[in-house]
Amino acid sequence: MSEDTGTAGAEEFARLLTELKTRSGLSYGTLAKRLHTSTSTLHRYCNGTALPHEFASAERFARLCRATPDELMALHRSWILADAARGRRIERAPESAPADRPAAEAEPVGEVVPAEPAPPRRRRSALLVSATAAALLAAALAVARPAIWGGGDKARGDQQAVGATATASTTTDSTGTPDDPVTTATPEPPPSTPAAAVAGATPPGPTPTPTPAPADTGPAPLTVGTRPYVYADPCSQHFLVNSAPAQVGPPAPERDAPRWAAAYGAVSSGEQQVALTVQGTGTDTVVLLALHVRVTAKGAPLAWNDYSMGVGCGGQVDAQSFDVDLDRGSPVITTKGGRRDFPYKVSKSDPEVFYVTAHTKAHDVRWDLTLDWSSGARHGTVHIDNGGTPFRTSADVHRPGYDYPLGGGEWVKREGG
C-alpha cells in the first residue's frame, strides 16, 4: 500500500467524522462528555491532526452521531488505511548517523581477498574422477528407479507439502487439508541394486518425467484482526460472571473488555458480536471464498450472575453482519442487516470488515471460525478464535442481573432480574 493511499485514508477518516458530527447537531462538548474524553481530542480527530489508536473510540463517536451501517463500514476502512500508514512511517524513521564518524571507518570497496593455494595436481585429478563417478551413478539411479522400485507417475503424484502460518492453518497445495498435513519422502533404493543400473544401462519401463516442485509453503497472503467483544452500544454487551457483585469491578469499555473478561472469567451472555478485519499483505488480490462456524463444545447454560456493561443507552443501530444461531444442531453463517454473502475480495489497500453475531438461548457454547481464501494458484484456510481459545457464549436463563448506574459506585440489582 502506497503512502498516498494512507494519506487519503486519513483525510477520508477526518472528513467522515466531521460530516457525522455536523449532521448530528451535537456539540464537541456534549460528545466529549458522553465519550469520556476531551473536546480538544475530538477536534484533532475531526481536523485530521490526530488518529485514534483504536477504532473503538471512533466507532462510539459515530454511533452517538447515529451513523448508518454503511457509514460505519466506510469509517472503519479509512481508519485501517490511515493506521497502516502511521505504522509504516514509524518503521521507516531512520536513525541519525554520527556526524563525526572518521572517513577511515568507511566500508572497504573492491577489497581483494587472496585465494587459498591450489591443491596438488594429483589431488585435483582424484576429486575430478570422484565427482564424475558420483554424477554418473546418480543419473543411472534416477533412470532406473521407476521400473525397479515401483516409482513412475504414482510415486511422483503422491509427493506433496502442506504449509501453515503461525496464526492460521493454511494449505497451499491442491490436495492437502488443514487438519491432515502430509509429507511424502522419496523412497531410498533397496540394497540389492542391479548391476545394470549401476553401470548406467537403462532397464525396460516408462521414461521418467521430472519430479514436480514442492507446493508453495509460504505464509497466507492475508491477515485477520479480531475484536472479540464489539459493543453496538454499551448496553448491548452483557457478561456472565461466577462471582457476587461485591467481588466484581466496574464495567469496562469495549477496548478493555478482553482484559475485564479474562480477569473475572466472564462469558458473553446471550449474544456475542465479533469483528473481523481482513486485509491482504501483498500486491495480489485475495478472494475470500467462505466463512464457516465450528462448535467445539456445547453444554447446559451457566448458572452465573449477569452484568451489563452500560445503562441508559439509546436505540441500537443494526449493523450489517453475519448471524449464527448457536442453538442449531449444525450452526451456519447467514447474512443479516442487508449484508451480502461471500465471496469477497481484499488487498493491501482495500480491506474488509465483517461483523459476526452469535447468539444462544439454551446452551453454553464454545465456538470458532474458519475463513477459506484463494490467491492465484494458492489457496488455504485461516483459523480464527479468541487469542488461541474458542469464543464462548452462554444463554442467560433467568439469572440475576446487575447494572452499574452512571455516577454510581456499586452494582445494583436489575428490576425483574
Image (spheres, rainbow, N blue to C red):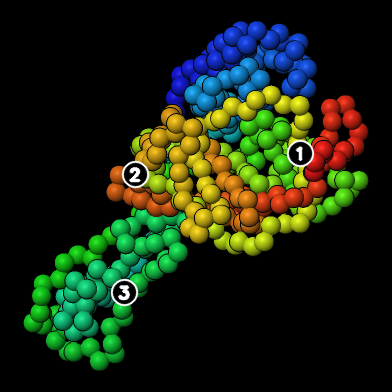
Q: Which mark is residue 212?
A: none
Which residue is depicted at the point 35% across and 67% down?
A: 119
The number of numbered discs placed on residues in the rendered structure image is: 3
Check contact, mark 3 vs mark 1: CB within 8 A.
no
> The disc labelled 3 sits on which kind of residue?
Thr
Mark earlier in primary sequence (3, 2): 3
Residue in the image at 18% along x and 78% along y:
146
Q: Secondary structure at mark 1?
A: strand
| Residue of label 1 | 308
Question: Would you place residue 395 above or below residue 91 in this image?
Answer: below
Q: Nearer the viewer, residue 214 or 40?
A: 40
Residue type indicated by callout 2: Ser
Whether residue 97 appears in this view of the structure is: no
Q: Is residue 328 left or right of residue 123?
A: right
The answer for how far apart the CA atoms under marks 3 and 1 are is 60 Å
Label disc, if present, on residue 375 of the rendered structure = 2
Identity of the amino acid at label 1? Ser
Measured as percent of width and height from the top left, residue 393 is found at: 64, 51
Label located before the other in sequence (3 or 1): 3
> Which quadrant of the structure image shows residue 230?
top right
Give whichever of 166, 388 is nearer the camera. 388
- Seen from the viewer's position, the closer of residues 228 and 157 is 228
- Please tell me which residue lies in front, 378 or 34: 34
Mark number for residue 186? 3
| C-alpha gap between disc 3 and disc 2 | 29 Å
For the residues bearing labels 1 and 2, Cβ distance under 8 angstroms: no
Label 3 residue SS: loop
User: Which circle, 3 or 1, is nearer the viewer?
Assistant: 1
Q: Position of residue 108 (x, y in %)?
A: 49, 37
Q: Earlier in the sequence, mark 1 or mark 2?
A: 1
Left/right of residue 367 with respect to residue 375 in the rendered view: right
